[in-house]
Amino acid sequence: MAKHNTGRRGRSRKRRPGQHNARELPERASAPARSAPRAVGAVAQPKTLGERPQAPWHPLPLSELLILVGMIGAVVAFLRGVEGSVALLGASIGAVAIGTFEVALREHLAGFRAHTLMLAVIPAVVFHTAVVLVVPAFANHAPRWLNVALLPLDVAIVVVCFKLLRARYVDARRERTFAGLR
């Protein structure tokens, strides 16, 4: 008896995104209230919904310009060397941080994209930095144990801010979703 498949590969049994099993089709038609089974290549719910929220100064891309100028300043500061450009490097990092913070906060409060953890860490960093910079004004130097002592306060600030920001994002996302369905 001769082999008919010699030289050819067998047919692939992998399901393709558009193909459905015969058992799934009646289930889909009979149970509209249940969620339909996902195809193999189906994409999960998108992380963004709609368009990015516009800034109050919309035609001018101020935040993006701040980030660009800060990046250029940081490159120039690194090329010059550390000794003569500490102020330029600090200003550049500050410009990038302000631009990034503004975009992240605008997107988060509008329910466009969640930046909860990043936004929750910022108040803790500001608090910790302020304490470490103010203590030497009253003492000769900041004690090393101060950073360790501030750690539980930093964690508490992050946890409280995270919960508040997450609740605000969920509300804004729900409003954005319902506005898109109308």
Image (cartoon, rainbow, N blue to C red):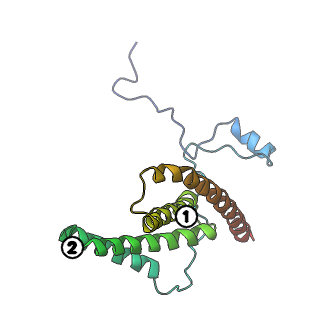
**Residue 47 in view of the camera:** no
Q: Secondary structure at mark 1?
A: helix
Residue 164 in percent (x, y) is at: 67, 61
Nearest to the observer: residue 49 or residue 80: 80
The disc placed on residue 84 is: 2
Q: Which mark is residue 88?
A: none
Closer to the chain start, of discs 1 and 2, is 2
In the image, residue 142 above or below residue 85 = above
Question: Where residue 7 sits: x, y (%)?
Answer: 33, 26
User: Can see residue 19?
Assistant: yes
In depth, the one of 52 and 77 nearer the eye is: 77
Disc 2, SS: loop
Question: At 60% across and 57% down in the image, what residue appears?
Answer: 157
Q: What type is the residue that disc 1 sits on?
A: Pro
Q: Residues within 10 Å of mark 1 (few under 14, many from 20)?
A: some
Which image quarter holds the N terminus?
A: top left
Q: Of all residues shown, which one is farthest toward the front?
A: 139
Whole-percent x, y for residue 34 in the image:
77, 45
Residue 42 location (% of width, % of height): 58, 48
Question: Who is closer to the viewer here, 76 or 46?
Answer: 76
Label 1–label 2 contact, CB within 8 A: no
Q: Which residue is mark 1?
A: 123
Q: Against 20, is 50 above or below? A: below
Q: Looking at the image, is 57 positioned above or below residue 66?
A: below
Distance, label 1 to label 2, CA atoms, is 30 Å
